[in-house]
Image (cartoon, grey):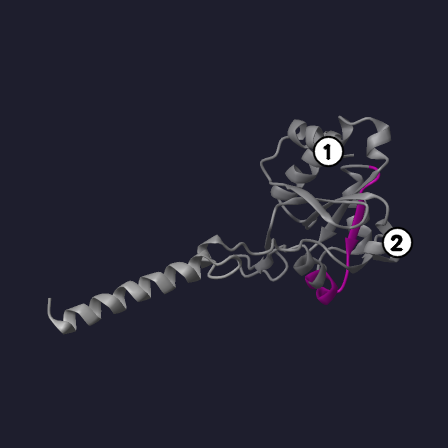
Amino acid sequence: MSPLKTILLVLAVALVAVGARFWLLPGQGTPAATTTSAPAVIGGPFTLQDSSGKTVTQADFAGKYMLVYFGYTYCPDVCPTSLQTMTAALQQLPAEKTAKLTPIFISVDPERDSLALIGQYVQHFYPGMVGLTGTPEQVAAAAKAYRVYFAKVADKTGDPTAYLMDHSAITYLMGPDGAFITHFPHDTTPAQMAAKLAGIL
């Protein structure tokens, strides 16, 4: 073997040894693929108004579970279905469990959803449901805290009052401390929601 090949071989072996030592040292050289990112935080402070015009914040629900849904009263199908699922699930639970929980509907359409209209709307579903909305800025802040997407979709006829709201269709269960516990996607059945709630409440 030529002197040059010998030198190159020695260098290669040395590099492999250094690399192996680096990867085996505890707490060092952790591959990027093995790292995990922190889960997204869901929920947080909000300031909105209820159907009576009273300012409501997350502090008003301290000590109680919250079942939170974002939607709007003009929603043709998704919102009524989700709220009916919530209602049917709560009706399957004993009173001592539902007493620990407040169902909350937050409108993402403050332009059309007046406080009075929201109050009437939620009472069609569940007597203890709280309807909330606020200024566009307040609603956007609450939606951002809950990682909720919403956007106005213009009507094809050009009628500025006949728009729809595209929005997330997820129901969130928050704990007595305001922390996120779990969520229910739109296709959750009342029985599935009731069973999960019964195990938590």
Image quadrant in which you'd find residue 190? top right
Span colored in magenta = 127-140
Amino acid type, residue under disc 1 in the picture: Leu
* Residue 137 magenta: yes
Do we see residue 175 in this rendering? yes
Looking at the image, residue 189 lies above or below residue 37? above
Q: Residue 95 location in percent, x, y?
A: 85, 29
Looking at the image, residue 195 lies above or below residue 41? above
* Dot placed on the residue nearer the N-terminal end, 1 or 2: 2
Reading the image, the residue beneath label 1 is: 197
Reading the image, the residue beneath label 2 is: 52
Q: Residue 82 location in percent, x, y?
A: 66, 39
**129 vs 29, nearest the viewer:** 29
Work out which residue is located at the far left of the displayed protein and give it: 1
Quadrant (top left/top right/bottom left/bottom right) for the N terminus = bottom left
Quadrant (top left/top right/bottom left/bottom right) for the C terminus = top right
Q: Count the marks: how many?
A: 2
Per the image, label 2 sits on a secondary structure element best described as loop
**132 vs 61, nearest the viewer:** 61
Work out which residue is located at the far bottom of the displayed protein and give it: 4
Q: CA distance from mark 1 to mark 2?
A: 29 Å
Amino acid type, residue under disc 2 in the picture: Ser
Q: Residue 179 location in percent, x, y?
A: 74, 50
